[in-house]
Image (spheres, coloured by chain):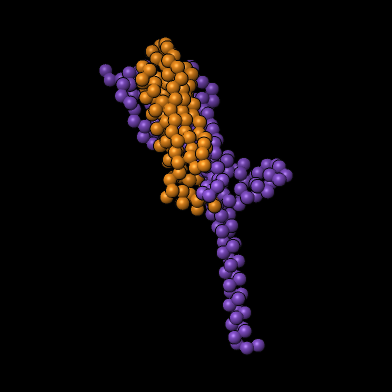
Amino acid sequence: VFISNTESVPGARVTRALGLVQGNTVRAKHVGKDILAGFKNLAGGELRAYTELLTESRNEAIGRMVAQAQQLGANGVVNVRFTTSSIAGGAAELYAYGTAVVLEQA
Amino acid sequence: MSGDAVAGLVFGLLCVGLVLLLVLAIPLYSILVGFHRRSKIKEQLAHTEPQLQQLVQTNTEAAGHAGSTALALGTVAYAADGPSRLATQWRSFFGGQAVSLTEQADLARRLAIVRMLEQARGLGAIGVANVRVETSEIFSGQGRNSAMVIELLAYGTALLPAAEPPQPPAQAQQVPQFLPDEPTRVRPPAH
């Protein structure tokens, strides 16, 4: 499945739009990683453990969105957007959504 | 003055000194290590940003592009340092710009963009179109485990040059594997 965050795909033409598809995942903090992050939090800086966690989770959300698109018989998802938000105390939701489409070579 | 009194005085001063040192150690550590980390990020950005300037960056669509495209993502989980956050709490009494946090948000965002561009360059892209940048608070820093973490996410469409005849982005039957550092891109269909 082809993924793009643009509305149109260069070299291809959208023949059918199959509707909105979405994927999400909620991740809680890892206690072990969090203790280290707590120390780091004093001096600030990048928290690599969390960067990895977010990357993994986002890929999972993308995977779910793609699975939904495949179920609809799409071969592409266009205009993909990502959002991240803190929903409960120590949990973050990663959300990916887009429009499932059938693409044909122009 | 007897020897005992002198020993007591020295002991007392030592105790006070130790307590003072402990009280000062945490802010001092935060300020010094935080400053060091930020200057390392700045160094890294000063090194990598000029190299990535060759990539054309826009936040509009690239309808006229001849080659294929792929999604490029860059993400950074970032925590601002304690002293700056504390200073900002005071600052918010009067309003105005929080200088240190402004700088840190900018650094983290540029780092996220650099990662996106690096991923695009790894794919052999000539540019990145439709760039979107997002800031979100993922852990608020309230409550018992008060880690405050923000996320800076940059994503866009990597424009790949049309070396081979452009392939239709179709026929990917199997579910692609989303590995952490592997961008999602079209597999050319087998002939």
Please determine whether, in this image, residue A74 is positioned above or below residue B76: above
Answer above or below: position of B148 versus A18: below
The residue depicted at 58 percent of the width and 77 percent of the height is B11
**Numbered disc total:** 0
For chain A, the rendered hue is: orange
Q: For residue A22, what is the image quadrant? A: top left
**Res. B60 image quadrant:** top right
| Residue extending farthest left | B191
Please tell me which residue is depicted at 43% across the width and 48% down the height of the picture. A31
Residue at the (56%, 45%) spot, across then down: B142
Chain depicted in purple: B
Q: Nearer the viewer, residue B120 or B161?
A: B120
Instruction: Where is residue A71? Give x, y as percent.
Output: 36, 20
Q: Is residue B56 visible?
A: no
- Identity of the residue drawn at 61% across and 75% down: B13
Eyeballing the image, is B3 above or below A61? below
